Amino acid sequence: MKNVIFFRDADISSGESVVVYGLNMEVREGDLVYIVGKVGTGKTSIIRTIIAENRLESGSGEVCGFDLRGLRRKDTPMLRRKIGVVFQDFQLLMDRSVEANLDFVLKSTGWKDREAMDRRIAEVLEAVGMQTKAHKMPHQLSGGEQQRIAIARAILNEPELIIADEPTGNLDNETADGILQLLTQINRERGTAIVMVTHNRNIIDHYPGRVFETKNETCTEI
């Protein structure tokens, strides 16, 4: 299996300062990987480096076949097409319908065939159990439903990798469990690698995977 993420002796920065020294991480196709650690220990900075929001200044790093050290700004959208991101706060566009949210992503990633776009939107909504919600506005949906739409958005371009940053942080336990079932089902059935940032160790007990912990300016597999 090929690596979708590879870091070797990588220093991870936040702004001007290094927050994680000497990161070594390999994530392969089909892996379910957790990053855990206290607030402020570098979890989000690692995520931002993976999606090329933060530059990698030292060491080596590769994500979905793209060299992070040599990545040109104009190639960043090509990298991000291979990554689906699910945020804690959903980050849906509140001024347009569910369908229009998904349509916006397809247009911005180069889709042009209207029929193919409509078909793909229907496919992802069915995959997350939201096929009857296409014409709803985000504010008409519950938090769990909004997060399902966010997951549908994340899988639109059939990514090699899904990054989930505290995806259940704003949800009650029952709703959160449904979201975790959905993500792990995508991981299992599609072979999509998932890297999930969480502070909830119970998740790992119920949905086992590899675990990296950030502490003392390091991030190591435990």
Image (cartoon, rainbow, N blue to C red):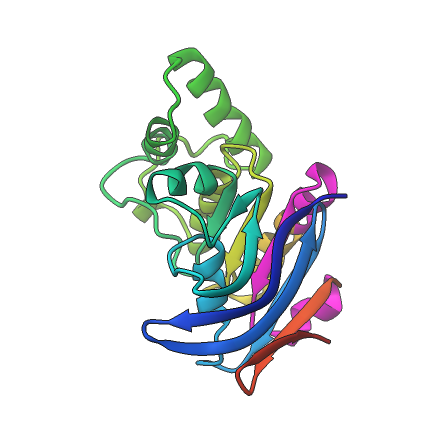
Q: Is residue 117 left or right of residue 59?
A: left
Kindly identify the residue that appears in the image at 69 percent across and 37 percent down.
190
The x and y percentages for residue 160 are: 60, 40
The x and y percentages for residue 121 are: 46, 26
Q: Image quarter for residue 214?
A: bottom right
Kindly identify the residue that appears in the image at 31 percent across and 35 percent down.
97
Give the camera-side residue of 92 and 165: 165
Q: Is residue 41 left or right of residue 222?
A: left
Give the camera-side residue of 198 and 181: 198
Dividing the image into 4 quarters, which one contains the N terminus? top right
Which segment did they paint magenta?
184-207
Q: Is residue 186 highlighted in magenta? A: yes
Picture mark count: 0
Give the vertical position of 117 relative to 79 (above or below): above
Give the vertical position of 92 relative to 37 (above or below): above
Give the camera-side residue of 185 and 16: 16
Residue reaching furthest to the bottom: 216
Give the vertical position of 110 relative to 175 (above or below): above
Kindly identify the residue that appears in the image at 45 percent across and 52 percent down.
51
Give the camera-side residue of 144 and 60: 60
Q: Is residue 185 left or right of residue 53?
A: right
Kindly identify the residue that appears in the image at 44 percent across and 42 percent down.
80
Q: Is residue 25 highlighted in magenta? A: no
The x and y percentages for residue 23 are: 59, 70
Dividing the image into 4 quarters, which one contains the C terminus? bottom right
Q: Image quarter for residue 75?
A: top left
